[in-house]
Amino acid sequence: MEMVLLTALGVGGATVVGAIIGFAFKNISHKFSDIVMSFAAGVMLSAAVLGLIMPSIDYGGKYGLVITIVGIFVGALALNFIDKLVPHLHRLAGSDMESHNDSKLSKVILFVTAIAIHNLPEGIAAGVGFGSGNTSQALVIAGGIALQNIPEGMVIIAPMISAGVKPRKAFLLAALTGLIEVVGTIIGYFAVTIASAILPFALAFAGGTMLYVISDEMIPETHAHGSQRGATYALLVGFCVMLVTDVLLG
């Protein structure tokens, strides 16, 4: 349990680290943020497939493939439902906040909410990994999510500052999104520990949410500013880095 708590703090704390970097480098270029975020997308893609989806098939036994496919789609649909339920603004690097009639403060609330609703399932994914009992695989998943959280933390500071949020409050809001991920990690861990029968489905569900975030949020955003070629190779590098890590730890 101690390992889970430390990892949860590490995953959530990565957002805080990114926020600190964001304060130091307020004018982050589209190209740089797209490359970094694409690398993180590759890391998350590898972690989702190798650390969640493939183990789901293995743990599912006779019906493992069916359970996994259902879990992936349920995870994706759940996140899609949350996106529709909660007013949503795309959250990634340097994106111009959409034009609304709302006040700047309302835009900030939407902006932070969009991050939070995606951080919860990411945290759950990390916790589910530990619930499977495979610590090395769980660390790979958590490492991939934490790595993604650093550039995310970097790019959320500037929009809040430009909207008139005081630096201290902007930092606290960024830290709050990281705390939500800590809560998600603990929820995921206890869910599969208490009811081990749901482990195959929970792994696939977590994998589906990660695939949804990568496809719906990260890849489109990193290809929207003319850096798509570099972003594509950065994704491949991120995927291969985690692939090598998984083989070495496995």
Image (cartoon, rainbow, N blue to C red):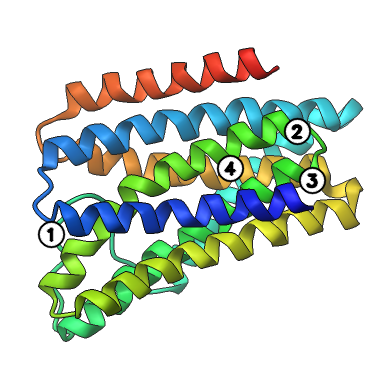
Q: Is residue 125 left or right of 45 when viewed as pictured?
A: right
| Image point (51%, 22%), residue name | 242
Residue 55 in picture, x, y percent from top left? 74, 28
Within 10 angstroms of label 1, few (less than 14), some, or many (20 or more) residues? few
The reply to whether discs 3 and 4 touch (Cβ–Cβ < 8 Å) is no
Q: Is residue 241 left or right of 193 when viewed as pictured?
A: left
Residue 56 in picture, x, y percent from top left? 75, 33
| Image point (71%, 41%), residue name | 129
CA distance for labels 1 and 4: 28 Å
Earlier-in-chain disc, 2 versus 1: 2
Question: Which residue in the protein does label 4 denote?
Answer: 208
34 or 85, which is in the foreground?
A: 34
Find numbered disc 4 in the image and state the secondary structure of the residue it sits on: helix
CA distance for labels 4 and 2: 11 Å
Q: Disc 1 or disc 4, which is closer to the eye?
A: 1
Question: Which residue in the protein does label 1 denote?
Answer: 96
Earlier-in-chain disc, 3 versus 4: 3
What is the three-letter code of the residue carrying label 2? Ser
Q: Quick check: can you spot residue 181?
A: yes
182 or 109, which is in the foreground?
A: 182
Residue 97 in picture, x, y percent from top left? 16, 64
Find numbered disc 2 in the image and state the secondary structure of the residue it sits on: helix
Find numbered disc 3 in the image and state the secondary structure of the residue it sits on: helix
20 or 144, which is in the foreground?
A: 20
Circle number at residue 131: 3
Q: Disc 3 or disc 2, which is closer to the eye?
A: 3
CA distance for labels 1 and 3: 39 Å
CA distance for labels 3 and 4: 17 Å
